[in-house]
Amino acid sequence: MAAWEQAVIETGLQGLHPEIVKLLGRLKYRTSYGQNQLSHAIEATHIASMLAAELGANVQISKMGALLHDLGKAVSHEVDGPHAQIGADIAKRYGVPDTVVNIIASHHHEVEQQTVEAVIAAIADAISGSRPGARREALETYVKRIKALEDLGNSFSGVAQTYAIQAGREIRIIVKPEDIDDLASLTLAKEIAKKIEDNLEYPGQIKVTVVRETRAVEVAK
């Protein structure tokens, strides 16, 4: 039995467009930190099914979104862009429901999650990817990458603090509002993103968010 046939039978999601199913089968030959991507998709589907049932959400939509959430990785070596958006575009092209398309597009929080099923699928993805033994990345390597991201952000003038979040998929840059204005914040985000691209090795993509907070303080006496 082909890998794609086994995947749809095991998850109970027969009826997907044949082209979608073929692309799903390609994930058998992709890995992330040693974790097979087809096995990850199937595991995330089972987790999403249980979570949705417990929460009273739509089980079928949650399962379909979890199974297809990394669909874009099947062609990410051929098409430019984030794999979440690539997968969402493919799914929409082949008639996947809009709620599932949003699950695929939003599972790395690059677009807004529109339903509870989108949140469930993202949680299932995270559980499958972070459970003990799922991935081979050494803790030391992970910590070094997080520290390198934060050190890079802190190296820019006007930055008060840098925080790596979402397992290193995003960095939040807190700037000194007296040194960096709104226009400079936009420029800073682009400069930091470019420096990350030029100097660091990392899987997927990293979102750079610059936060400029202004406070007005008075004391009542």
Image: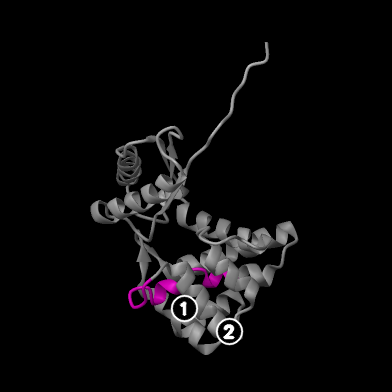
- Asked if residue 190 lies left or right of residue 5, the reply is left
Q: How many labels does the image show?
A: 2
Seen in the picture, residue 84 relative to 7 is either above or below; the reply is above
Q: Which image quadrant is residue 27 in? A: bottom left
Name which quarter of the figure residue 32 lies in: bottom left
- In front: 109, or 18? 109
Residue topped by disc 2: 16
Location of the C terminus by quadrant is: top right
Q: Residue tagged by mark 1?
A: 24
Q: Residue furthest right?
A: 56
The residue drawn where x is 68% and y is 60% is: 116
Which residue is farthest left?
199
- Above or below, comparing residue 204 to residue 12 in the picture: above
Of 213 and 154, the residue lying toward us: 213
Q: Return the x and y of residue 193 as percentages of the image width and height.
A: 34, 53
Mark 1 crowdedness (10 Å alpha carbons): few <14, some 14-19, many ≥20 = many
Please state which amino acid type lies under the numbered disc 2: Leu
Residue 72 colored magenta?
Answer: yes
Q: Which amino acid does label 1 sit on?
A: Leu
Residue at the extreme top of the image, as rendered: 221
Is the residue under label 1 in contact with that under label 2 (CB below 8 Å)? yes
Magenta stretch: give its range. 64-80
Q: What element carries label 2?
A: loop
